[in-house]
Image: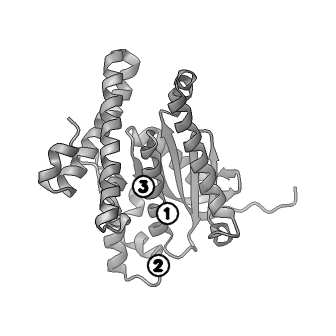
């Protein structure tokens, strides 16, 4: 093997679809669940196709790599990509919206470090760290953003040359939130109403999405509570965390007159 294998400094996100395995088991009796599974897989395929398709953005030419397998997705950006942190966070916002709109929850980790990522091959210390953030630190349906990324020097390192440092800091910190209990930083995708370019039509799209998420969480929580088994307790804890997060987004970002309509009881 003559190929020279070298690590690069890259941003890497490892994202897992929570509930995917259970959905596959339950899909035997439900056509609706099978449709959700197919949609989730096609979304992953679209993400990868868009990244490598010459007729689209061909982000791979700029060093962006996407790998997916079963219920997980890995996205990485080279540190040389202008605005890499800015863009990978935005990509994760949209991917998260797509996934929860399809009735799955997301858990993941975003970090920076030494990585080899070419096509379907991905390994290195940064991959290990991203997986650790997802599997051991996140615990709940959230994408943990490594604390090393939430500082002025690191934000400046990835700053897009057309943006001022002040703008970049405000934008990046507007995409993340610190958990009041364990102090971990996570992607605050549900609050990103600005990404819908809110006019009269798109604000309705955003509100309808929130209503759909609310209904799904209430229904799923009720189903899991009725099962009343020890195995379900950890699942219920994850949904309870998400319920708190969702309600916090509503109380902080939606007019009070709409709270009763949106809040998960």
Residue at 30% over, 41% down: 214
Q: Determine whether the residue tagged by mark 2 lies in a helix, strand or loop.
A: loop
Q: Could you say which quadrant of the image residue 223 lies in? A: top left
Q: Determine whether the residue tagged by mark 1 lies in a helix, strand or loop.
A: helix
Scheme by which the image is coloured: one colour
What crowding class fits label 3: few (fewer than 14 Cα within 10 Å), some (14-19), or many (20 or more)? Answer: some
Mark before the other along the chain sequence, 1 or 2: 1
Q: Residue 5: percent from the left, percent from the top? A: 75, 60
- Nearer the camera: disc 2 or disc 3: 2
Q: Residue 247: percent from the left, percent from the top? A: 23, 45
Mark before the other along the chain sequence, 1 or 3: 1
Q: Which residue is mark 3?
A: 146
Q: Is residue 130 left or right of residue 256?
A: right
> Of 40 and 188, which appears nearest the observer?
40
Image quarter hosting the N terminus: bottom right
Q: Determine whether the residue tagged by mark 3 lies in a helix, strand or loop.
A: loop
Residue at 33% over, 60% down: 192
Q: Could you say which quadrant of the image residue 156 lies in? A: bottom left
Residue at 62% over, 65% down: 64
Residue at 41% over, 71% down: 155
Q: Residue 86: percent from the left, percent from the top? A: 44, 69
Q: Which residue is mark 2?
A: 160
| Any part of residue 187 in sight | no
| Any part of residue 180 in sight | yes
Q: Which residue is mark 1?
A: 88
Q: Is residue 125 left or right of residue 146?
A: right
> Of 152 and 67, which appears nearest the observer?
67
What's the distance in space between the residues labelled 2 and 3, CA to CA? Answer: 20 Å
């Amino acid at each position: 093997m003559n190929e020279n294998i070298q690590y690069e400094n890259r941003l890497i996100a490892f994202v897992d679809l929570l509930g995917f395995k259970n959905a596959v088991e339950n899909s035997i009796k439900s056509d609706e669940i099978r449709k959700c599974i197919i949609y989730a897989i096609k979304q992953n395929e679209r993400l990868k196709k868009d990244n490598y398709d010459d007729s689209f953005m061909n982000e791979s030419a700029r060093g962006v790599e996407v790998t997916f397998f079963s219920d997980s997705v890995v996205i990485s950006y080279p540190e040389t990509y202008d605005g890499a942190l800015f863009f990978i966070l935005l990509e994760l916002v949209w991917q998260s919206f797509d996934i929860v709109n399809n009735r799955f929850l997301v858990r993941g980790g975003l970090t920076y470090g030494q990585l080899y990522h070419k096509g379907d091959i991905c390994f290195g210390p940064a991959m290990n760290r991203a997986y650790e953030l997802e599997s051991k630190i996140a615990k709940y349906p959230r994408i943990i953003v490594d604390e090393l990324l939430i500082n002025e020097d690191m934000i400046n390192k990835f700053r897009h040359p057309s943006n001022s440092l002040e703008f970049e800091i405000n934008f990046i910190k507007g995409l993340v939130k610190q958990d009041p209990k364990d102090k971990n930083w996570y992607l605050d995708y549900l609050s990103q109403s600005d990404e819908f370019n809110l006019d009269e039509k798109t604000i309705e799209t955003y509100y309808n999405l929130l209503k759909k998420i609310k209904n799904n969480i209430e229904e799923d929580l009720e189903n899991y509570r009725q099962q009343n088994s020890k195995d379900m307790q950890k699942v219920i804890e994850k949904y309870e965390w998400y319920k708190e997060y969702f309600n916090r987004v509503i109380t902080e970002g939606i007019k009070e007159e709409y709270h009763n309509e949106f809040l998960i009881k």
